Amino acid sequence: MTEVAPKQGPGGRLVLAALVMLVFAGLAWAALDRPAAYPGLASSVLDRLADTGAANPVTAVLLDFRAYDTFLEVGVLLIAAIGVLSLVGRETRVAALPPGDRTPVHGVLLRVLPPLMVVTGLWMLWAGTSQPGGAFQAGAVLAATLILLALAGKDAPRLADTIRLRAALAIGFAGFLTAALAFLMLQGGLLAYPAVGKTAWIVAIEVGICLSTAATLALFYLLPGSPADRA
Amino acid sequence: MDQADIYILAGMALFAIALHALAARRHLVRKVLAINILGGGCFLVLIAVARRAPGPVADPVPHAMVLTGIVVAVSVTAVALILVRRIRSATGRTDFPEDNRDDRV
Amino acid sequence: MVDTSWAAIAVAVPLLAALASLWPGRWTAVAVMAVAVPGALLATLGVVWTVYEIGVYRHPVGGWGAPLGIDLYVDGLAAAFLALLAVVAGLASLHVLADPDVKAMPRRRQSLFWSLWYWVWGALAAMFVSGDAFNIYVTLELATLAGVILVSFGHGAVALFASLRYLLIGTLGALSYVLGVALLYGATGTLDLVLLGERLVPGPAVVVAAALVTVGLAIKAALVPLHIWLPPAHGSAPAGVSAILSALVVKAGFYLLVRYWLGPFVSLGDGVATALGILGAVGVLWGSLNAIRQERLKLLVAYSTVAQVGYLFLLFPLAAAGGHVMAWSGAHLLVLSHATAKAAAFLAAGNILTSQGTDHLSEIGRASHHHRLSLLAFGLAGATLMGLPPSGGFLAKWLMVTAAVETGQWWWAAVLIIGGKLAAIYVYRVVRLGFVTSPMEPPGAAGPPRPPGLLPVPMLTILAALGLAVVSVGLGFASAPPLRLLQIGMPAAPGIALEPLP
């Protein structure tokens, strides 16, 4: 990446630098102010943790207390996937490593790593309800597996804008929306999980999010990476 | 001055540095990077805010906000990068055109 | 049955449509629209009705309730914006359905376009009923990202540049906003807007947080000088997209500023209110003068948006000085009438551009007979933009001018009046084309059905533009219900007793 020359002259640069320093001064002034602190929500979260379907406080916030944010956030990811599909042509293939780069190490790693990664990802998904981890992290590891395979030229998936791909991208949000509306009908509240089987609902939603995250992140990397576009 | 203060100041500094880069750098990829660092600064501030809350444990709500923010940042970056690529393949440019006349078709 | 669920349904309907649209095919688009538009209108009616019945209400998402959970917060303002959204986006959907530019896209690309379309809709609905500072950030990002990608569907590299610029600046705004929210949470331990207002104590952290939130939202609202991203983006996007971006997404930034500055931030001082008013006044003049200079119709309309947003910001100084009820009613009636007028103007401009391949004013005059219905829609919308009686724009400006005079701030009234005169100039530049006799169409003759080289304009696209224009004028006749709605849950001005509108 060669840097294009800055467009402003030395005067303009000084003004900009001064402005940014001014902004920083204001931010630092605010940062060092510690207003008579209201307690955060930590104690309320811990008090009600038993009523949620999760044992980890962050997961409880993400998928129960503030599940609505997470629901919309899964939507952001879906929009980005739609954007990538619309900005790239219909079908592309991933550039694999040229054959000359393949070494024995490469071969062993490719046999050993992917299964390990898949297991790690699934474990993170499962552990997410009680320990750090969760659907997004698990999805990221699964996506990394797909990308590794594709880069190594092994079973490089041919990504195409098919219904199946779209289903994979959308299932996380679709599952979440279905649950949200079902609870609205049954419980009278958007995303108000029924008291019975709460954990099961949360895990089911997480599986969907994990699949969609994996598909979306892999798409981000693999779909635009076509040799034709790279030329 | 404790640990949380250092984190929050570092977050603010990152925000300011990224602001400078966003304005001064012309290469589009650098601008996208600047946006990411801007987000990183915000997340650092949120982590520090979580630590500052009185109580035995860090406040999980800002942590959840950071996770949400990261997913949003990834999405924005993906769309921004593909736009940069499309711009380069359509015009050969890697920066915004100099003349800001928007009446050209 | 009075049910708070209507607010949730109003958010869910467009999101369901966004998912269903991913199945490619023309019939999917038609079917989804046939369900989604009436569904959204029905849900909005439910929201409006419940607000009339029970006043301001909350819907605790997940059953937790603020501050631990997120609440949907519905008052008259939220209901009015939801209604505006349903009407504008609904009619604009009809336009998109018949738009030849959209129909010319490959099937799969079309379905992606529709999905993004409903995403913008759903994001705005979620934003209007959100009562939570961080949740608002997520909805802002949803609307921006979907809007950015829709802009990139426009023609050529200009649209790509505009799209990326919009994304970078929009994300900067969102991050500035979220940094402010982080500081607010540190100071108050809550994200609920009402609780935030109760706990806010002015201090360095709160002042800087308010500044960050305001700058972030002002970028979204395209307040001068943070407007530079708007004209290229709105000028190069497909017509329907320009219409909802200009009519709704920009107004959403203003909506949130009202939520904050006539909500939790109201105690932070009148200085900011004056500053916002001055920037708004500069916006009125700067936007209008630029609109007058433009040679392309869509850019003219885009710069006019910069001017129209400027008027709205006069609400802040007027409310701070005590002209509370008048200014509140006037500014929001202005939002309603301008949003419908602006959408109509962009759709009309889009019809002309699609048919003729160019929207240069000099070219339009050559085939004005062919465009007469689109020019009529533009003229009706223009009457609202100028503030001609009896349009909605007239009544709204009359309320604001009254507020300015009553509080002894005649200079704001002057801005409103000068802005109206400038609008008359740029609207006239377009409308006069309808009376120009062009060499292609000899006078007196009924004229050929269509001058050579021009594509036909589908009737549905013209009806959508006309429909929106008629709504914008009609708001002047039927202003009582929206004004009554807007006053439900209106924030009280500090130290001033509320009095009902005469």
Image (cartoon, coloured by chain):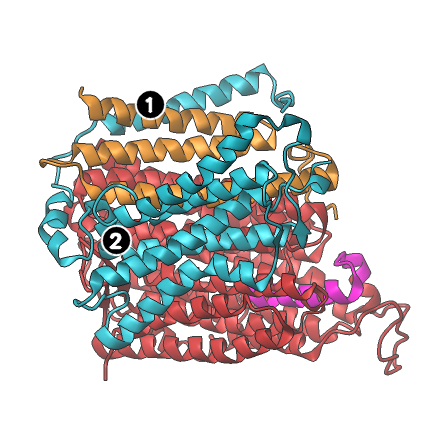
A23 or C13, which lies in front?
C13
Residue at horizontal 65%, vertical 59%?
Answer: C238
Figure quadrant of the C terminus of chain C: bottom left
Q: Residues within 10 Å of mark 2 (few under 14, many from 20)?
A: many
- Percent position (x, y) of residue C102? 67, 65
Instruction: Name the colour assigned to chain C in the rendering.
Output: red
Q: Chain of mark 2?
A: C
Check disc 1 and report the residue beneath it: A25
Asked whether residue B17 appears in the rendered view, the answer is yes
- Percent position (x, y) of residue A140? 42, 43
Check disc 2 and report the residue beneath it: C263
What range is drawn magenta here?
C342-363
Residue kind at label 1, given as amino acid type: Ala
C205 left or right of A223?
left
- Percent position (x, y) of residue C314? 40, 52
Q: Quadrant of residue C254?
A: bottom left
How many numbered marks appear?
Answer: 2
Q: Is residue A29 magenta?
A: no
